[in-house]
Image (tube, helix red, strand yellow):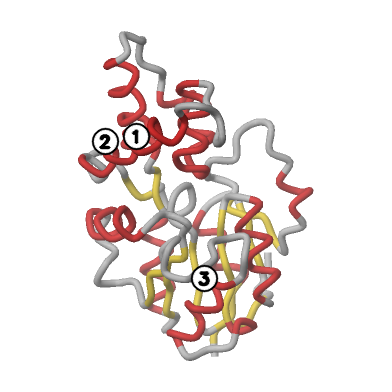
Amino acid sequence: MTARYRVRAVLFDLDGTLADTAPDLGGAVNRLRARRDLPPLPIATLRPVASSGARGMLGVGFGMKPGEPGYDALRDEFLAEYEAALDVDSRLFEGVADCLAALHSRGLRWGIVTNKASRFTAPVVAGLGLAAKAAVVIAGDTTPHAKPHPAPLLEACARLGIAPADAVYVGDDLRDIQAAHAAGMPAIAAGWGYLGEAQDVLSWRADAVIATPLDLLALLESD
């Protein structure tokens, strides 16, 4: 690959892009299942839907969908359980730390834009050792709209003092690609995330699909 994007900053999704948070999300699901005398589910079964948060986890863990009777109460119980133990087994994906270090050495700032609520985002980012390194962190409730709306990405750029065209966004979900394009910035699909076998990444029309975090470096130019 040759360098294609001249940027001043790189923005990343959190769950499924920078970090594998599925073990802690799945742990919350399994504790809820244990209370109901249900056997635990393998994290591998839950990992493909981790980017969808409570909606995905409760869909696989309990066959529950938003709007169904009892869903809201189960969601609140799940979120409370997750909040109590959300930085136990979450880890950066292989290659992420080296990628972030390389961006820093090039003089590029990087930040996080996630749909995860602030009450969960802040402790997870801190637990991963990223809080002091990220130039900006935008959570799902930082702006009135979450992805795929462009507002979170536009807010990140405003805080960085750059135009959207001077950044790229890296994410592992269709909403990430849609949000980036709506904001007017290139969108790069993270092929190592929570894509699942059913995901047709090419149909997302991302500007690029990369297999590993370090592959991102070959796509970028800096001033």
- Give the mark nearer the N terminus: 3 vs 2: 2
Query: Of helix, strand and loop, which one carries label 1?
Result: helix
Quadrant (top left/top right/bottom left/bottom right) for the C terminus? bottom right
Could you classify mark 1 by the number of other residues whose Cα lies within 10 Å: few (under 14), some (14-19), or many (20 or more)? many
Q: Are marks 2 and 1 in contact (CB under 8 Å)?
A: yes
Residue 100 or residue 164, whichever sits in front: 164
Could you classify mark 2 by the number of other residues whose Cα lies within 10 Å: few (under 14), some (14-19), or many (20 or more)? some
**Image point (36%, 68%), residue name:** 101
- Residue type at mark 3 is Pro
Q: Position of residue 208 (x, y in %)?
A: 69, 60
- Residue type at mark 2 is Glu
Q: Position of residue 202 (x, y in %)?
A: 76, 49
The residue identified by callout 2 is: 81
> Against 217, is 171 above or below?
above
**Image point (59%, 40%), residue name:** 195
Looking at the image, residue 122 sits to the left or right of residue 170; the answer is left
Label 2 – label 1 distance at C-alpha: 5 Å
The residue identified by callout 3 is: 152
Looking at the image, residue 10 sits to the left or right of residue 148; the answer is left
The residue identified by callout 1 is: 78
**Image point (55%, 78%), residue name:** 154
